[in-house]
Every structure is written in C-alpha cells, then in structure tokens.
C-alpha cells in the first residue's frame, strides 16, 4: 500500500461528514505501469466498509487513523486470502 494522503479526509472530518473506507484489491496485478487499461482476465475486488463517524473520536487525526487502519486491515485480509495471486 502506498502512503496515505489525508488532506481530503481532513476536510471531511472538519465538516463532520462520515467517511466510508473502500478497499480495492487486485489493482497491482490488474494495471500495467504503462497502460491505463485493466489487463484482460484480471479480477478486482471491492470492499466497502462501515462508515466512520468523526464525532466518535477525540480528534480528527484519530478518525483519519481509523480510516487508514480499516483499509490496511482489509488489504492484509485480501493478501491472506489471495496469497498466490499477490506478487507484492
């Protein structure tokens, strides 16, 4: 997983909007570095997680950290299930 960019999340936290973490699995295998199209025969997986309510956290940073942790955990679970397909 690449480093998270949190500016958009910070804006949502400041506005008090719920944040819905979404994980896309298989993108590394499906997208060529040089092409914009998905490689034929590749399977992508999307996991939409429970919304995170910023008001339930002590700080905006804690809410953003919860989003990142949810996505990292989904990535970890994806890799466990798809061990043979994951090259990274």
Image (tube, helix red, strand yellow):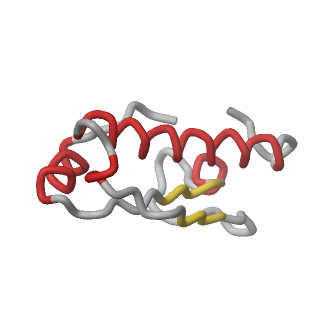
Image spot of residue 59 (x, y percent)? 24, 36
Rendered residue at 50%/38% (across/down): 69
Rendered residue at 33%/50% (across/down): 56
Q: How many marks?
A: 0
Rendered residue at 81%/48% (across/down): 82
Q: Nearer the viewer, residue 57 or 47?
A: 57
Q: Nearer the viewer, residue 75 or 85?
A: 75
Note whether 69 is above or below 36 in the view shown: above
Rendered residue at 68%/39% (across/down): 76
Q: Nearer the viewer, residue 5 or 58?
A: 58
- Is 23 displayed left or right of 6 in the figure? right
Note whether 25 is above or below 33 in the view shown: below
Instruction: Work out which quarter of the rendered image holds the C terminus and state it.
Output: top right
Image spot of residue 8 (x, y percent)? 21, 50
- Is 52 displayed left or right of 7 in the figure? right
The picture quadrant where one finds residue 60 is top left
Image spot of residue 53 (x, y percent)? 34, 57
- Is 28 displayed left or right of 16 in the figure? right
Image spot of residue 17 (x, y percent)? 23, 63
Q: Nearer the viewer, residue 80 or 50?
A: 50
Residue that sits furthest to the right in the current view: 84
């Amino acid at each position: 997983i690449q480093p998270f960019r949190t500016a958009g999340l910070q804006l949502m936290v400041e506005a008090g909007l719920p944040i819905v973490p979404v994980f896309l699995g298989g993108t590394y295998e499906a997208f060529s570095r040089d092409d914009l199209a998905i490689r034929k025969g590749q399977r992508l997986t999307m996991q939409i997680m429970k919304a995170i309510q910023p008001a339930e956290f002590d700080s905006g940073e804690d809410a953003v950290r919860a989003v990142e942790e949810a996505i990292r955990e989904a990535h970890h679970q994806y890799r466990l299930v798809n061990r043979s397909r994951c090259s990274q």
